[in-house]
C-alpha cells in the first residue's frame, strides 16, 4: 500500500472539457494509492459521473460556476479509505427524490442511472446539501 497522501483539491469550470483531465488525475491518485487496474477504472468512472452530474444538473453547464473536487485519505480503524467529495454551486435538490432506474416506469428513461452506477462502483456514497450552497456527494473507496 502506498505511503503518505497529500489532499488534492480541484476547482473545475462547468464544462465537459474538464472531464479527460479529471479522469487522468483520478486514475493517477488510484495508482499511487495502490489500487489495482479494475479499482482504478471504476473509481475514475464514479468520480467522472459525479462531476458530469454536478456540471449538467447542479450548475446547469454555466461556465461561471465551479465544481469542487477533493481527494483525501482518511483513517478507518486499522485501514484507510480514499474519500472523494464533489460539490457544485447549483440550487440543490432532494436526494430522496432520486428515482430507481430499475423500476419499470424508469427503465426506458435516457438518464437517471448515474447515481445508481456510482453507488455500485464505490463502497459508500452520501448526497447532501453543502454548507457553502449547492450539493455535495461524498464517495468512499476502501484502500
Image (cartoon, helix red, strand yellow):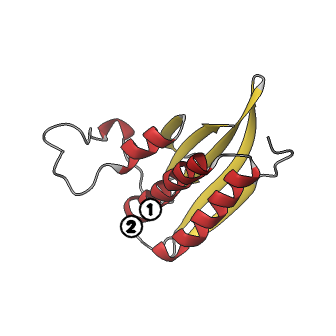
Mark closer to the chain start, 2 or 1: 1
Tell me where residue 98 sits by quadrant: top left
Query: Which quadrant is home to the C terminus?
Result: top right
Q: Position of residue 68 (x, y in %)?
A: 60, 59
Identify which residue is drawn at 73% across, 57% down. 8
Identify which residue is drawn at 65% across, 42% down. 83
Task: State the separation of the CA atoms marked 2 and 1.
Answer: 10 Å
Q: Which residue is mark 1?
A: 52
Asked whether 56 or 111 is in front, the reply is 111
For this orientation, the residue located farthest to the right is 4
Identify which residue is drawn at 51% across, 37% down. 126
Instruction: Categorize mark 2 by other alpha carbons within 10 Å: few (<14), some (14-19), many (20+).
Output: some
Query: In the image, is 92 to the left or to the right of 1?
Result: left
Above or below — where is 60 with respect to 44? below
Instruction: Categorize mark 1 by other alpha carbons within 10 Å: few (<14), some (14-19), many (20+).
Output: many
Asked whether 94 or 52 is in front, the reply is 52
Tell me where residue 116 sits by quadrant: top left
For this orientation, the residue located farthest to the left is 105
Q: Which residue is mark 2?
A: 60
Kind of element beneath mark 2? loop
Tell me where residue 25 sits by quadrant: bottom right
Amino acid at each position: 500500500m502506498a505511503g503518505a497522501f497529500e489532499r488534492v483539491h480541484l476547482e473545475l469550470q462547468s464544462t465537459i472539457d474538464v472531464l479527460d483531465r479529471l479522469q487522468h488525475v483520478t486514475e493517477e491518485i488510484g495508482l499511487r494509492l495502490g489500487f489495482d487496474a479494475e479499482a482504478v477504472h471504476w473509481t475514475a468512472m464514479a468520480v467522472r459521473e459525479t462531476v458530469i452530474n454536478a456540471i449538467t444538473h447542479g450548475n446547469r453547464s454555466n461556465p461561471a460556476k465551479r465544481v469542487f473536487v477533493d481527494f483525501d485519505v482518511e483513517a478507518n480503524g486499522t485501514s484507510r479509505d480514499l474519500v472523494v467529495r464533489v460539490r457544485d454551486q447549483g440550487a440543490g435538490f432532494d436526494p430522496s427524490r432520486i428515482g430507481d432506474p430499475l423500476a419499470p416506469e424508469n427503465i426506458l428513461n435516457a438518464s437517471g442511472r448515474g447515481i445508481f452506477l456510482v453507488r455500485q462502483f464505490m463502497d459508500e456514497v452520501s448526497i447532501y446539501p453543502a454548507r457553502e450552497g449547492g450539493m455535495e456527494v461524498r464517495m468512499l473507496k476502501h484502500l
